[in-house]
Image: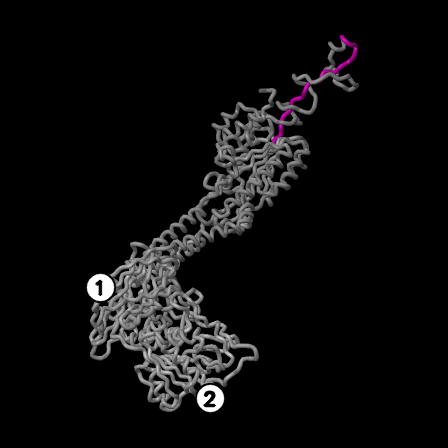
């Protein structure tokens, strides 16, 4: 059993479906909308019969009324494929005293993956650093989850971030529409991040970004000088936090504003989350917000 | 500034503690693994301006607060006297002006200036701790060590006097004293800056200042100026007194302070040999000069008395004493060859109808035997004397006689005490030598007692001889050449006038000029006989001669036996009867200016303390530890203000909860 899996939480969240905000192109029937017309219970439209159409889908009642052949079309439902992109750079190992960001990312990814597989969707994992790019292909089999969790559990954050390259790779690699969940502190160039998100969006993926931050990184509250050592490249800086707190917060605020704007431009679902946030309300709100308005 | 506990100044080194703590803290930093390094680097780059300055200011405030505390603990004493640049003072030499003018009060009901400044000096000395105080007072001129400043204002040597002050002499004495004294010293000069006492033209100033500055440890010179407004004050002054037969003639002046306005009545009381009379005078303007005649009772050989006015701002200038002796005729001698000039001179010396004046003429050759000490004056209208006549004339002058020299009328190479006559000169045809200006306040051509000038402008000369030699000119011709000069010989005076009362020379014989000049010179010469009854306090005549004992015989005011020789009054010195008054120049109100003070104390780098005479400024020195404590509090307050976080300090997230718990608000 992995320490980032909370069975009680999963059981409480089990009643909430994970909905896609864009039509999905699955390979099996599922509960998500598909861009294709097919046989389902949801009526879509009539169209004229053309040779080659399945004659079983002819609407005989319409033929009787109009003496013309019409095909009655219904929306097709399909399954969803989700890719969890987890940033495993050194900065994800930061903790201000509580949980590390990577551990928090594990918990989110594991919970959502479980829920997806549980509702018949496929979940895959992509782990990125500057040197490493692990992938667990999406699968909707329950047995697949163990591999998913095992990979998550073995993650050792190190080195600089390779998130941007990983996102571009994923955008190119995934042929069909997918639900891409990014779990990262996004300590990278916002412009490059925006490009990567646009690339994903161009491929018509549904993007969700969990921007993970430690409360100490936001509050920046220290009572004495510190020697700050970069978790990624090891550079060090001795500073009096009280003297630079304002400038630090201004820079951080500018960064967050830019990231938020880039996500907005790419129609990505953006969540800024601090690692002291309880997971259940976070996920419950996240899932609820994704429910289609018409179904409420 | 002095420190009563200077060893505590070592705590000043504690001012470096905040800096050391800061440096140690910087070295005792904690290492932390950090992720958001990009923002940290950016913040570190951008915070090098105002933030560092603010931090430096905070450190400075802390250091200064500790320094101020150390200063306060060392008990600093700052004084207008001591100044700010001082350290421990070993000796203070106080030059105390005890002249009569120092007795004036700054206002009604206040202490006289002398007592005010003494109290301030006493307090300042108490603040100085164990500094040695040496007093040189203007009356005695002696240096006297004062065992304790507390008794300063109860000493006889700081009491009121009727003397004048000789400031250059006092400073010279201070310089002499300090040459025998080691250690750091200061000279405090307490005076009302009365010009007549300071004598700005005196050559001794330069020598005294040079002596002070030549000392191994240059003393600081502080001038305690005691000037400013005063209480209403009037003064009575006896300008001259003379016995003419059975009456006494007095030239009196009543003056009041320069800023006084309007007309005021003044009661003048005359006290003569026990009799007393009071009359009311009206004083309109600044001064009133008048002549007063007092008939003497029959057979009065000698006596004394005084004129007094009511008490006012200065009690020392409300009385003028006089004394007189037996009546005597005024004899003068005209040394001139017989002729018109001699006749006019005889007439001027003993005008018909003017009782009590006698004149005799002798030829120059007989002058040596005719010159007697009982003569009031000699008029010498002949070639300057040589041989026995010159010796006799020299002795006459030295004893106090007055001699008026007139041109001999012909070229002469003779000289008398390096004074001589130039060759006779004639005015251009149709023109005259005319007097352009003359001294109207001093000398025989001065204005009358009522301010009436003599008719010197009417004098026209066609011939003249210019007096030559080292002497003070008192009148000049239009071309700037001297017409009347004066040379002082010990007690006597020689006068040289550049023309003679002869119609071939000038109209001097018309009496417009000759009569007053000759009469005034004779009167001045005869005053030395009456002057044996009249003297100024502190003058040589007022000193005791061997074997004499001083007794004050009048009953005016209160007396201080310890200061008898410095007080005005009727004194009997052995067989002599002497009326002593304050020196006439002590009544002169002129005060030297700052520029004059700069000039006479040039090179001493003196400090002028104008406030010393202000009655409402009680202290010349103060404990200033409170000021340092206040400064410390101000520094701490400033430090606290600088340490306060900015009001507008913005958080990264509006609310932390909004960032985490209310996530939908962040959803896009």
Q: Look at the image and give the residue range highlighted in magenta.
A: A65-82
Expressed as whole percent of the image width and height from the top left, the position of residue B650 reads: 51, 40
* Residue A69 higher or lower than A115, as above or below: above
Q: Chain of mark 1?
A: B
- A179 falls in the magenta region: no
* Residue B217 higher or lower than B399, as above or below: above
Expressed as whole percent of the image width and height from the top left, the position of residue B168 reads: 36, 72
Q: Chain of mark 2?
A: B
* Residue B564 higher or lower than B265, as above or below: below
- Between A24 and B618, the one nearer to me in the picture: B618
Q: Check whether the beta carbons of the residues at disc 2 and disc 1 lie within 8 A of each other.
A: no
**Occupied quadrant, residue B414:** bottom left
Image mark for residue B275: 1
Expressed as whole percent of the image width and height from the top left, the position of residue B503 reads: 48, 80
Badge 2, how many Cα within 10 Å: few under 14, some, many 20+?
Answer: some
Q: Which residue is mark 2?
A: B412
Q: Label 2, label 1: how many angstroms apart (C-alpha)?
A: 58 Å
Which of disc 1 and disc 2 is earlier in sequence?
A: 1
- Asked whether residue B73 appears in the rendered view, the answer is no
Expressed as whole percent of the image width and height from the top left, the position of residue A256 reads: 57, 39
Image mark for residue A196: none
Badge 1, how many Cα within 10 Å: few under 14, some, many 20+?
Answer: few
Q: Residue visible at 50% across and 73% down?
A: B436
The mark closer to the camera, 2 or 1, is 1
- Asked whether residue A45 appears in the rendered view, the answer is yes
**Occupied quadrant, residue B315:** bottom left
- Between B417 and A59, the one nearer to me in the picture: B417
Secondary structure, magenta segment, majority class:
strand
Q: Residue visible at 64% across and 34% down?
A: A266
Farthest residue toward the top? A64
């Amino acid at each position: 059993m992995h320490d980032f899996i909370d069975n009680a939480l999963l059981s409480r969240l089990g009643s909430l479906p994970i909905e896609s905000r864009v039509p999905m192109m699955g390979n099996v029937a599922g509960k998500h909308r598909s861009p294709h017309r097919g046989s389902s219970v949801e009526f879509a439209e009539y169209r004229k019969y053309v040779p080659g159409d399945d004659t079983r889908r002819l609407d005989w009642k319409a033929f009787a009324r109009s003496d013309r052949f019409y095909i009655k079309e219904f929306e097709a439902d399909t399954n969803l494929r989700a890719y969890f992109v987890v940033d495993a750079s050194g900065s994800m190992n930061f903790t201000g005293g509580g949980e590390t960001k990577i551990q928090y990312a594990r918990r989110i990814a594991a919970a959502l993956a479980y829920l997806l597989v549980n509702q018949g969707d496929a979940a895959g994992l992509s782990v990125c650093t500057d040197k490493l790019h692990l992938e667990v292909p999406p699968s909707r089999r329950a047995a697949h989850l163990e591999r998913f969790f095992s990979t998550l559990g073995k993650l050792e954050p190190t080195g600089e971030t390779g998130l941007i390259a990983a996102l571009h790779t994923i955008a190119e690699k995934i042929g069909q529409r997918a639900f891409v969940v990014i779990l990262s502190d996004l300590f990278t160039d916002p412009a490059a991040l925006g490009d990567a998100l646009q690339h994903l969006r161009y491929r018509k993926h549904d993007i969700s970004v969990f921007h993970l931050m430690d409360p100490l990184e936001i509050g920046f509250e220290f009572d004495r000088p510190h020697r700050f050592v970069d978790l990624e490249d090891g550079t060090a800086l001795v500073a009096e936090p009280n003297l630079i707190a304002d400038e630090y917060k201004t820079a951080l605020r500018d960064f967050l504003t830019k990231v938020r704007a880039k996500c907005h431009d790419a129609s990505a679902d953006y969540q800024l989350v601090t690692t002291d946030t309880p997971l259940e309300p976070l996920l419950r709100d996240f899932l609820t917000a994704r429910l289609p308005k018409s179904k409420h | 500034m002095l420190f009563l506990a200077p060893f505590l100044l070592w705590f000043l080194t504690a001012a470096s503690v905040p800096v050391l703590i800061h440096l140690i803290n910087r070295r005792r930093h904690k290492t932390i693994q950090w992720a958001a390094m990009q923002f940290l680097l950016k913040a570190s780059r951008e915070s090098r301006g105002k933030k560092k300055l603010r931090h430096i200011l905070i450190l400075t405030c802390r250091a200064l607060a500790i320094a101020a505390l150390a200063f306060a603990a060392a008990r600093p004493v700052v004084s207008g006297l001591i100044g700010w640049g001082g350290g421990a003072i070993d000796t203070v030499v106080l030059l105390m002006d005890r002249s009569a003018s120092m007795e004036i009060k700054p206002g009604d009901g206040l202490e006289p200036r002398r007592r005010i400044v003494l109290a301030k000096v006493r307090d300042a000395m108490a603040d100085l701790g164990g500094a040695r105080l040496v007093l040189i007072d203007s009356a005695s001129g002696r240096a006297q060590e004062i065992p304790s400043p507390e008794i300063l204002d109860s000493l006889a040597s700081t009491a009121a006097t009727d003397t004048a002050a000789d400031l250059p002499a006092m400073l010279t004495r201070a310089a002499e004293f300090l040459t025998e004294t080691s250690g750091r010293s200061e000279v405090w000069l307490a005076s009302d800056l009365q010009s007549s006492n300071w004598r700005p033209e005196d050559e001794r100033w330069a020598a005294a200042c040079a002596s002070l500055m030549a000392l191994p440890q240059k003393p600081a010179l502080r001038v305690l100026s005691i000037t400013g407004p005063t209480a209403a004050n009037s003064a009575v002054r006896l300008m001259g007194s003379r016995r003419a037969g059975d009456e006494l003639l007095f030239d009196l002046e009543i003056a009041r302070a320069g800023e006084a306005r309007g007309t005021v009545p003044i009661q003048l009381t005359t006290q003569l040999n026990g009799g007393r009379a009071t009359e009311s005078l009206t004083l309109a303007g600044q001064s009133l000069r008048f002549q007063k005649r007092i008939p003497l009772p029959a057979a009065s050989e000698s006596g004394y008395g005084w004129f007094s006015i009511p008490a006012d701002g200065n009690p020392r200038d409300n009385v003028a004493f006089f004394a007189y002796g037996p009546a005597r005729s005024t004899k003068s001698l005209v040394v001139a060859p017989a002729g018109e000039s001699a006749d006019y001179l005889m007439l001027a010396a003993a005008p018909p109808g003017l009782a009590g004046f006698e004149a005799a003429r002798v030829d120059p050759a007989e002058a040596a035997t005719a010159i007697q000490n009982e003569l009031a004056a000699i008029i010498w209208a002949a070639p300057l004397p040589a041989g026995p006549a010159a010796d006799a004339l020299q002795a006459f002058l030295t004893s106090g006689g007055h001699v008026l020299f007139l041109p001999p009328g012909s070229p002469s190479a003779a000289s008398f005490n390096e004074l001589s006559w130039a060759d006779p000169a004639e005015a251009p045809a149709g023109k005259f030598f005319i007097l352009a200006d003359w001294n109207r306040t001093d000398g025989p051509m001065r204005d009358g007692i009522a301010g009436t000038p003599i008719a010197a402008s009417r004098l026209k000369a066609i011939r003249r001889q210019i007096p030559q030699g080292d002497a003070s000119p008192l009148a000049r011709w239009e071309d700037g050449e001297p017409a009347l000069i004066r040379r002082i010989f010990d007690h006597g005076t020689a006068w040289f006038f550049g023309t003679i009362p002869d119609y071939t020379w000038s109209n001097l014989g018309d009496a417009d000029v000759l009569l007053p000049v000759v009469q005034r010179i004779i009167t001045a010469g005869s005053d030395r006989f009456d002057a044996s009854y009249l003297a100024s306090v502190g003058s040589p005549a007022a000193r005791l001669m061997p074997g004499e004992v001083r007794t004050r015989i009048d009953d005016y005011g209160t007396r201080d036996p310890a200061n008898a020789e410095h007080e005005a009054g009727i004194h009997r010195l052995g067989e002599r009867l002497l009326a002593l008054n304050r020196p006439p120049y002590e009544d002169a109100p002129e005060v030297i200016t700052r520029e004059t003070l700069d000039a006479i104390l040039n090179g001493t780098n003196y400090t002028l303390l104008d406030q010393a005479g202000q009655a409402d400024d009680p202290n010349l020195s103060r404990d200033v530890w409170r000021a340092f404590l206040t400064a410390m509090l101000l520094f701490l307050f400033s430090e606290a203000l600088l340490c306060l976080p900015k009001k507008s300090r913005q958080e990264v997230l509006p609310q932390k909860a909004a960032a985490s718990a209310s996530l939908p608000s962040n959803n896009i």
